[in-house]
Image (cartoon, rainbow, N blue to C red):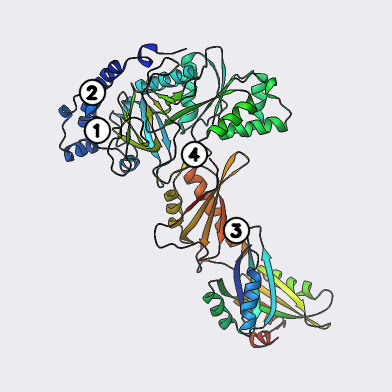
Amino acid sequence: MIIKQLTVFLENKTGRLNEVSQLLGISGINISAMTLADTSEFGILRMIVSEPEKAISILKDAEFSARLTDVICLNSPNEPGALARALDILSGECVFIEYLYAYSMDNKTANIVLKPDNIQKCIEVLQKHKMELVSSSEMYKI
Amino acid sequence: MIWNEKIECASRDEMRAVQTKRLIETVERIYHSVPSYRQKMQEANLVPGDIRSIDDLSKLPFTIKNDLRDNYPFGMFTVPMSEIVRIHASSGTTGKPTVVGYTRKDLNSWSEVVTRSLCMAGVHREDIVQVAYGYGLFTGGLGLHYGCENLGASVIPISGGNTDKQLQLMQDFGTSVIACTPSYSLFLAEEMEAAGIKKEDLKLRVGIFGAEPWTENMRREIESKLGIKAIDIYGLSEIIGPGVSCECEYQVGMHINEDHFVPEIIDPITLEPLPAGEIGELVFTTITKEGIPLIRYRTRDLTRLNYEKCACGRTLVRMEKCKGRSDDMLIIRGVNVFPSQIESVLLEMSETAPHYLLIVEREGNLDTLKLMVEVQEQFFSDEIRQLEALRKKITHKLQSTLGISVDVKLVEPKTIERTAGKAKRVIDNRKL
């Protein structure tokens, strides 16, 4: 259930994001989801990739500051109110969300990547309420 | 006006006689009251009786800033605390400040030398002096303050900052003399322009500027923008504070109050005294201080001395504007900053690597300090609020250690250049 998200610290400098994508590209690593959070000083790049362990060793060799972070991915119907239902369950059980990002798979389903404060509790809560979690192997293949 | 003509215009022989008498007394006193001095003299095979004239000064061992730190806080004081009536402190080379104590007599001597300085600058009793140096542990504010009172001028103890109020009082009170850092005076000039205040609207005529290095170009700019005479004043808290030396109206070097503080110029490498006129490191011996007399204190300021009589009539030896430092101290907005202080703050924090780069810029007329620091890989978080919290923590720690705000920028590990030799820690982009 737990998915290894690749997180990279980036200074706000021209070309740094490009370097990351090139390094992963030539190593045959596919990015299935990504989001870039920025502040005025630096950025944090978060990605779900096909081979997280390989990707992190490539980036570290290139002297990037990178790490793997545990996240989960919720598969949700792509319809109005679906996200609210999921969040309702989590807030009802006092699961705090550090951040999330989401993308639609098609017109039927969407994936919501979540970083909760307590990942085990979050998984239990979602499973108890019969919410569908995406397995890591599925996630890396997308 | 010359405040103390008898001593300020004394012949060289008269001055040497005063210095000799006072040096002998000082050495006698410290030998018997400060263990660290006694030990140093014993190591140099010296007893107080070996010092018979001012010419013997160079036999004595040096004192450095670290001696003050090693005896932190009061170990170098030569009188019991019951005799100390004031304590000031400035930044040390690492976390601990440099502490100095004054007896009542020391405060009187300090007022005397500041009053002489004010007279050199052309200030008189009728003047209204706005003291915009910081009041507090820093010696600038209170030092100028008591000198002005001693002279009989009217002091506005406004302290530093609060520019709107500074300008308001300058207009409403008819301030004729401003005392602040030279960079702040230029900032005031800019703010005046922005507020539509013309120099003709003010009664300003003299500025007493010190606590940071400035150039002849800055002087010209200040003088033309504010319509004043810009006078350079020099001092350091270890010796007494402002008033160690000051320019007269001829602006041809700063007259050292050498009946209190005897200057020498040494080669900072060989530590040998240099003949008059050569550039080297300025060293002071205090010969009247009671609280914390210092023998051959190395200021790290580079300058040279001129013993010729000045056009103003004073014979007090003159020092040139300081030409730099023989250490890595930076002066930012009048505050002394040592890279080693920053390093010790970073080393105390496990989250950052001791790899950093300091960038000093002059934006407009104010100095800014930016610190680029590498985030340790193991601490790098994927949460922005944790990184922001780290940045705030570093900023706060530096602010409380250095006393000035630092713009902290977190950078990727290994992005700061590693060098085989002495690491380049500071980029000073100020054009001085």
Looking at the rendered image, the disc whose residue lies closer to the viewer, 3 or 4, is 4
Q: Distance between the residues labelled 2 and 4?
A: 34 Å
**Mark 3 vs 4: CB contact within 8 A:** no
Subunit ID for the residue under disc 4: B
Label 3 sits on residue:
B388
Residue A87 position, x and y percent, is: 73, 71
Residue B403 or B17: which is nearer the viewer? B17
Viewport quadrant of the C terminus of chain A: bottom right
Looking at the rendered image, the disc whose residue lies closer to the viewer, 2 or 3, is 2
Label 1 sits on residue:
B58
**Element type at marker 3?**
helix
Q: What residue type is labelled 4?
A: Val
Nearest to N terminus: mark 1 or mark 3: 1
Residue B60 position, x and y percent, is: 23, 34
**Element type at marker 2?**
helix
Q: How far apart are marks 3 and 4 (CA)?
A: 27 Å
Q: Distance between the residues labelled 2 and 1?
A: 16 Å
Question: In the visual, does A113 lie left or right of B238?
Answer: right
Nearest to N terminus: mark 2 or mark 3: 2
Q: Residue at point 84% right, 78% down?
A: A79
**What is the quadrant of residue B168 in the picture?**
top right
Q: Residue at point 63% right, 58% down?
A: A41
Label 2 sits on residue:
B25
Q: Is residue B339 above or below residue B313?
A: below
Q: How far apart are marks 1 and 4 (CA)?
A: 31 Å
Q: How crowded is mark 3: few (under 14 residues within 10 Å), some or many (20 or more)?
A: some
Q: Is residue B144 above or below residue B71?
A: above
Q: How far apart are marks 1 and 3 (CA)?
A: 53 Å
Tell me whether marks 1 and 3 sit on the same chain. yes
**Element type at marker 1?**
helix
Q: Is residue A85 above or below residue B278?
A: below
